Amino acid sequence: MSVSIIDTTLLAIAMTDIAGLIIWIGACLYLAYTKMDLMLSHLKNSVAVNNLAPLRHGGPWGKLLLVGGIAGFVTFPGFYLKRGQLNPDDLANFPAALKRKLVCLYWCVIGLLLVMVAFFIAIKLGWY
């Protein structure tokens, strides 16, 4: 039995996607263990972050959720600013380099999850 070029290509894309998600989790955990105090100190007046702050004591899973939440607040601040969940001064004083990293991480995980959803839809519709 031989494997076609399409099978090989789809397998490579799927493996790359899974590897990307594993790397993403590692990057988030690295930020959680090294920059958590910095992130929380810059967002101390924000209600949404204060509600998520107890997750920092929830082990790796809690830290991952907290970094993901903060990345969401930084990536899409308009939604939270309108509702009073995020303090505009905290957001303005947030370190630019860290903000860039969090935004990049957030958009990367959105892209990786979209690839997974596309694979799922393609398989369910019988395209492959």
Image (spheres, grey):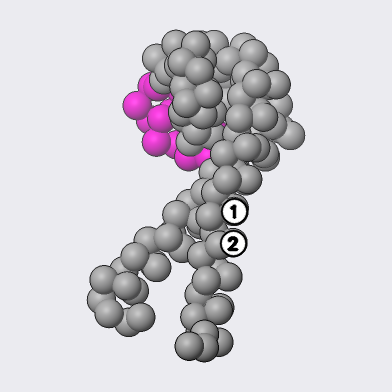
Image quadrant assignment for residue 92: top right
As drawn, the residue found furthest toward the left would be 125
Going by the numbered disc 1, the residue's amino acid type is: Ala
Q: Residue at x 34, y 74 (%)?
A: 122
Q: Where residue 24 sits: x, y (%)?
A: 59, 44
Q: Position of residue 38 (x, y in %)?
A: 67, 16
Work out how far the residue at label 1 is from the one at label 2, CA to CA, in angstroms. Answer: 5 Å
Name the residue rendered at 56%, 78% in the picture.
9
Q: Is residue 85 magenta?
A: yes
Residue 16: assigned label: 2
Q: Which residue is mark 1?
A: 19
Q: Which one is nearer the viewer's eye here, 86 or 115?
A: 115
Residue neighbourhood size for the residue with mark 2, other residues' Cα within 10 Å, grouped as few (<14), some (14–19), many (≥20):
few
What secondary structure is found at the residue carrying circle 1? helix
Residue 50 shows in this picture: no
Coordinates of residue 71 in the picture (x, y in percent): 54, 34
Range covered by the magenta-colored residues: 73-89
Residue most toward the front? 1
Q: Where, quadrant-wise, is the C terminus in this rendering?
A: bottom left
Which residue is found at the position 34% from the left and 65% from the top? 120
